[in-house]
Amino acid sequence: MNKKIICTSKAPAPIGPYSQAVKVGNTLYVSGQVPIIPSTGGLVTSDIKAETKQVMDNILAILKEAGMDFGNIVKSSIFLTDMNNFAAVNEVYATCFMKDFPARETVAVSGLPKGVNIEISVIAID
């Protein structure tokens, strides 16, 4: 197995014993991203759209480090603490893709790391 750890300072450092992403063969597994601002370590908490944009920016930074972009994503998992935010999250999420949207699930959870409202993980293929 050819496993490569992907890490960039342009995305938040892991807050536990995990990697930002792991690439095995041509598949990239990106760990769940929350709305942490990489340069400060602060959280975006102003509203769910801003939080979603920060999460997607963090994902894009990791994808770019691996030589990919949103077009390489084949699967997304979205975790929300409030399903009433579903439409607003979709609005921001949709701006990241031109066509051929990834497979996806959105799950309501009772809590997320650092008390945030959203976390997204993705799988991408090179």
Image (cartoon, grey):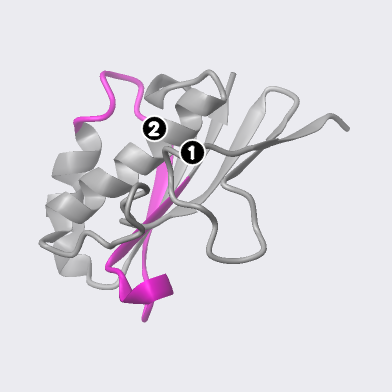
Residue ID for mark 1: 75
Task: Using residue 118 as the reference point, say whether residue 62 is left or right of it.
Answer: right
Residue at (28%, 25%) from the top-left corner?
97
Residue lying furthest right? 1
**Magenta stretch encompasses residue 4:** no
Residue 60 disc label: 2
| Along the viewing direction, whichever of 118 and 83 lies nearer the viewer | 118
Q: Residues within 10 Å of mark 1 (few under 14, many from 20)?
A: some
Task: Using residue 14 as the reference point, say whether residue 115 is left or right of it.
Answer: left
Task: Give the Cα distance between marks 2 and 1.
Answer: 14 Å
Q: Position of residue 32 (x, y in %)?
A: 48, 54
Task: Using residue 15 as the reference point, say whether residue 79 is left or right of it.
Answer: left
Pointer 2 or 1: first along the chain: 2
The image quarter containing residue 10 is: top left
Q: Which label sits in the foreground, 2 or 1? A: 2
**Magenta stretch encompasses residue 97:** yes
In the image, residue 117 sits, relative to residue 115, either above or below, namely above
Q: Quick check: marks 2 and 1 in contact, CB under 8 Å?
A: no
Please say whether residue 34 is visible from this viewpoint: yes
Residues in magenta, as a range: 95-121
